[in-house]
Image (spheres, rainbow, N blue to C red):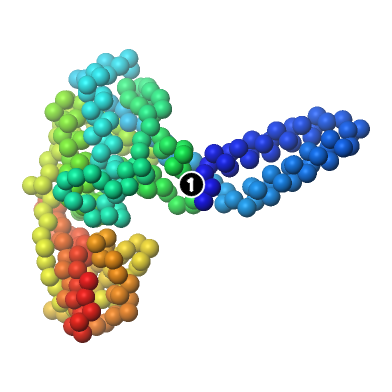
Amino acid sequence: MTTIQQYDYLQAELSTLNKMLTKLPESSLIERMSLEARRENVEKALASLEGPVRQPARFSLTFRGAPIFGSHGVQADFGGFAIKKFADAVRAIGTSQTETLGSRGALPNREEYKLLITGVARGSFGFVIEEPSENYKLIKEFSPLESAIHTTMSILKSSVETDEELNEALSESDPRAIKELHDFVRYLADNEAVCTLQSGRDSFSFSDVGQIRQSEKRLSEDNIREEDVTFTGAFLGYLPNKRMFEFRKDDSDEVISGRVDSSIEDADTINRQLDQQVIIHLLERSVGVSKHRTYTLTGFEFMDGVDA
């Protein structure tokens, strides 16, 4: 694909050519023909590109509380470390959408989640953060970074709502990603600070330190329980784009669904063995007192010997 800089360059050149043609005297026939030929080539080049339907991800992260001095400034050690912890959380949440994360070690695909501080956000004090334009592609879908920001905001919102809402928001994030976000929230709480995250028209703000301490507890390992479980039954389907499965349990005819772990490389096997007896291995997650469970498929063995 083509980077947005190339698209913007062509758009700028087209605008310049149109202005030049508007100001050109009618008597300058040869020059007009040359400019019109250049404009036609630029228009063809633009037509060959997939036009942008969105801009690179851009959001603001602002803080209030003890380390913040109104809209004037923030303690340097707090501000720098808070941004680092937030960036680590976003990277882990984004990467866990497509990869299985180890409990430690470097995260893969770091370049896709690079963040740039491009300005100061006023009101309280914070930062304007953007997606690097050199990594931006002209695509219709959200970039991995933009998707990660929206998921992060969804989890933060749900962390002060019901257990069911939090469980649903966490459904596509693995334990390491949740821990990284918990560490960011805990750092704010320990420093008597709160934050506001705004991306486009979507925003979330902690009301006070008490609320952020509540969020910290609800994102902790004590509140988010995970267990390996095994069921017998039959697959009803697999959606490869979303990496989602549906499964009917033998013992109760209950239908469960969830995401397929990235460690399962040949998940398409599922759709070739629908309604066949299979044993599946899942990571089952529950939050707080909620009876709702979310599932991640980690392995399966068909009775005829096909497995993953």
Residue occupying the point 64% across, 47% down: 46
Residue occupying the point 78% across, 38% down: 35
Q: Which residue is mark 1?
A: 137
Q: Residue furthest right?
A: 27
The kind of residue tagged 1 is Lys
Residue occupying the point 26% across, 24% down: 79
Q: Quadrant of residue 12?
A: top right
Instruction: Decide if residue 237 is on the left or right side of residue 35.
Output: left
Residue 89 is at least partly visible in this image: yes
Residue occupying the point 25% across, 65% down: 264
Residue 308 locus on image (x, y percent): 22, 71
- Judge whether 57 appears above or below 117 on screen: below
How many numbered callouts? Answer: 1
Depth check: give the residue in front, 179 or 213. 179
Q: Residue furthest bottom?
A: 304
Residue 118 locus on image (x, y percent): 41, 27
- Judge whether 112 appears above or below 25 on screen: below
Q: Helix or strand or loop: what does disc 1 sit on?
A: loop
Residue 270 locus on image (x, y percent): 29, 75
Residue 52 locus on image (x, y percent): 54, 46
- Judge whether 80 appears above or below 36 on screen: above
- Judge whether 294 appears above or below 116 on screen: below
Q: Residues within 10 Å of mark 1 (few under 14, many from 20)?
A: some
Residue 163 is at least partly visible in this image: no
